[in-house]
Image (tube, coloured by chain):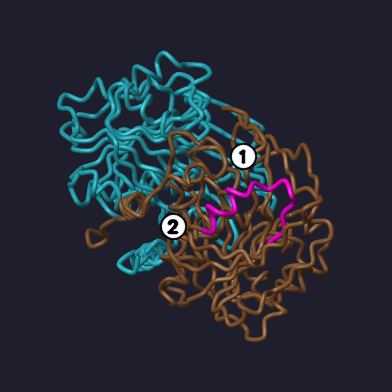
Chain colours: A brown, B cyan
């Protein structure tokens, strides 16, 4: 039940209406690994960091069952750095700084020990890099899940479409689904995007939950109504980590199990936003997670026999 | 199991990105009655129209079990008229024309035959008019549900708060909840609004579904992802009609039954938006409704034993 996770491991500096962080640990693959390792181990990580990336962050991930053979450490370079400022609605943000650093020339190498992995989670990254990992795998994983973002639609649409064509599940948010499909209706957008390759499409809507499309079927998972969203950074990655973590743990790639996986992902994301960065993800126990998942059951549970 | 419905019966002219209507029949109480009469009859309507309101609209409502003794007909005046234009997202709109006409001096009179009704649905209307109906009832209904809108928060906040204090269930949309509570977080907003009187609060989020709050409990109902939203006018009123209609039919005002009622309301609203005005509501059968409600079950149904 091994899982390969690909994505950035980086520094973030975050400003929200409620506070401001120093330069803290971030990156898609970091959030995915912290989230997924609650459900499945080992995780075979593929990423790149600079000499400035803290040793203790790597060892705490390693202690969670995250293998780091596929994480390149470029001693003389700097890690990827992103800085952003969230608007009051927490659904939109401005990028203040993007320093690609080690990501600029990232050429991922899949270690021999990673071959044969059953599940592949491609965190948001240069589409050509995501594709390179797929191509290096000698045996196609049972399920390939890919996250991406609007930025690649603007600068690398051709590469993006090539990569999308190779995956089973694509994750985008609602505005990205509209941008990628050029359709306003999410139902129409989903149909167009699935025609590009993925048999499953997950559209994330932040505080409004997430939709899973497959053929003519659709499933809706709510987000937990929270008193405060402290920092939404990494929520999408954490969602992806919970999703693929549950799939890898249960070894069941049916539509029905994907619905459960989305609830697990939503529960994980609801923790992520409670504190800056990965702080909350490092604190929670399996009991906390089970309790949160039960809140989701309560949230949507209704008795239809009365109708 | 009798239900009193209060609200406007009016003319609308609607422009959407997909089309433009002539002057068609609208009004909160019209939509509520068409929706609720699928579940409970008689409906005891309280409203006011001008001499221009079509006789056949009144008789078709009457044929649905809607009693019109409480509907004042002012022969020499004109019915309320609203004209609006929706933006592409269909969640926001500009009001182009508002002619109050008969609504300007509406003084509702509750007929003697309406006394003793178990349920009261106050559709969106001048808060003082809503309150006047409550005060005229000799016996307090088992459940009073009230809809309102941002306009009254701007021009009649004091009256609005007095009316809100008298009801059991308040219906508002997300931006109205924020405006009324001066809180951005919907969880905090809900707490503040329930402290104003209503034990139950429903926050409608359009295409993103609806939330039901009660004490520390919360329930989330999705909206059905639709290929096309043709005209959202009346969707909130239709939702309210399905909600109160289900409650009146089942005579059960528990939180658990309100959850089911919200699903019924959401199903009704999903029909409303498929055509201009009340057209779609006039076409559908009970079998259509049951089938639509099953789609909602499928939409949110997941198996958590796997977790």
| Vertical side of A196 occupied by A151: above or below | above
| Vertical side of A120 occupied by B14: above or below | above
| Vertical side of B269 occupied by B81: above or below | above
Chain to which the residue tagged by mark 2 belongs:
B
Depth check: B287 or A261 in front? A261
- Tag 2: Cα neighbours inside 10 Å, few (<14), some, or many (≥20)? few
Q: Measuring 27% from the left and 51% from the top, which residue is drawn there?
A: B246
Q: Judging from the image, what secondary structure is the residue with disc 1 in?
A: loop
Q: Quadrant of residue A195?
A: bottom right
Relative side of B146 to A142, left or right: left
Depth check: B131 or B107 in front? B131
Where is residue B126 drawn, in percent x and y?
43, 23
**Magenta stretch?**
A47-62
Chain to which the residue tagged by mark 1 belongs:
B
- Residue on which the image places disc 2: B282
Where is residue B90 drawn, in percent x and y?
61, 47
């Amino acid at each position: 039940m091994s899982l390969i996770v690909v994505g950035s491991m980086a520094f973030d500096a975050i400003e929200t209406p409620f506070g401001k962080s120093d330069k803290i640990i971030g990156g898609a693959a970091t959030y995915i690994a912290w989230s997924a390792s609650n459900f499945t181990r080992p995780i075979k990580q593929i990423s790149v960091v600079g000499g400035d990336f803290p040793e203790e962050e790597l060892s705490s991930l390693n202690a969670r069952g995250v293998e780091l053979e596929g994480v390149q450490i470029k001693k003389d370079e700097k890690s990827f750095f992103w800085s952003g400022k969230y608007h009051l609605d927490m659904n939109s943000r401005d990028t203040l700084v993007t320093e690609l650093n080690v990501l600029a020339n990232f050429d991922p190498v899949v270690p021999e020990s990673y071959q044969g992995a059953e599940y592949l989670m491609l965190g948001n990254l240069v589409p050509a890099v995501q594709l390179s990992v797929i191509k290096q795998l000698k045996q196609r994983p049972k399920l390939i899940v890919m996250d991406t973002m609007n930025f690649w639609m603007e600068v690398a649409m051709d590469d993006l479409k090539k990569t999308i064509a190779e995956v089973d599940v694509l994750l985008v948010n609602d505005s990205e689904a509209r941008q990628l499909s050029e359709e306003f209706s999410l139902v129409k957008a989903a149909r167009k995007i699935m025609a590009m390759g993925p048999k499953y499409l997950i559209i994330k809507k932040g505080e409004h939950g997430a939709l899973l499309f497959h053929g003519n079927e659709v499933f809706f998972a709510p987000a937990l109504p929270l008193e405060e969203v402290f920092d939404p950074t990494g929520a999408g990655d954490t969602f992806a980590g919970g999703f693929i973590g549950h799939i890898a743990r249960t070894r069941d790639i049916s539509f029905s199990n994907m619905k459960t996986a989305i609830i697990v992902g939503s529960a994980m994301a609801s923790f992520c936003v409670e504190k800056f960065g990965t702080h909350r993800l490092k604190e929670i126990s399996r009991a906390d997670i089970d309790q949160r998942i039960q809140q989701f059951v309560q949230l949507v549970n209704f008795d239809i026999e009365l109708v």
